[in-house]
Amino acid sequence: MQFLVPLICLLAGGVLGYLSVRHRAFGLYVVIALGLVAGILWCIVEAESHTGWDALAYGIMVMLFLAPALLGQLIGGGIGLYRGRKSGQRSGP
């Protein structure tokens, strides 16, 4: 079960990244990526200010949910950009 949750987050991020790049919604792609980075940074700051089990919960949230979703979005966006260029679609506005 501990491998299923990050895999689902990785796939969800990948699908969002792929679809936003293929449909040329680059603003949405950037907003989602910045939101995930902000969530990761917030969890790191909160984990530093807590001790014990409370800090561990923030680390688990980053490692199980946020980091796989960000990695999936980067991979999905890269695949979408590659397939778009391969089919002749331009990446600029």
Image (spheres, rainbow, N blue to C red):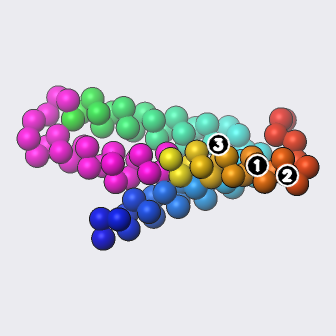
**Relative horizontal placement of residue 88, taking residue 38 as reference (left or right):** right
**Contact, CB < 8 Å: mark 1 with mark 3?**
no
Q: Which residue is mark 1?
A: 82
Q: What residue is at 65 percent from the left and 47 percent from the top? A: 77
Q: Which residue is mark 3?
A: 28
Residue 18 in magenta stretch:
no
**Contact, CB < 8 Å: mark 1 with mark 2?**
yes
The amino acid on which the numbered mark 1 sits, given as a three-letter code, is Tyr
> Residue 35 location in percent, x, y?
49, 38
Q: CA distance from mark 1 to mark 2?
A: 6 Å
Closer to the camera in the image, 46 or 74: 74
Residue projecting furthest to the left: 52
> Residue 37 location in percent, x, y?
45, 35
Q: In this picture, which residue range is highlighted in magenta?
A: 48-70
Q: What residue is at 78 percent from the left and 54 percent from the top? A: 83
Disc 3 is placed on an element classified as: helix
Q: CA distance from mark 1 to mark 3?
A: 18 Å
Q: Earlier in the sequence, mark 1 or mark 3?
A: 3
Q: Is residue 23 visible?
A: no
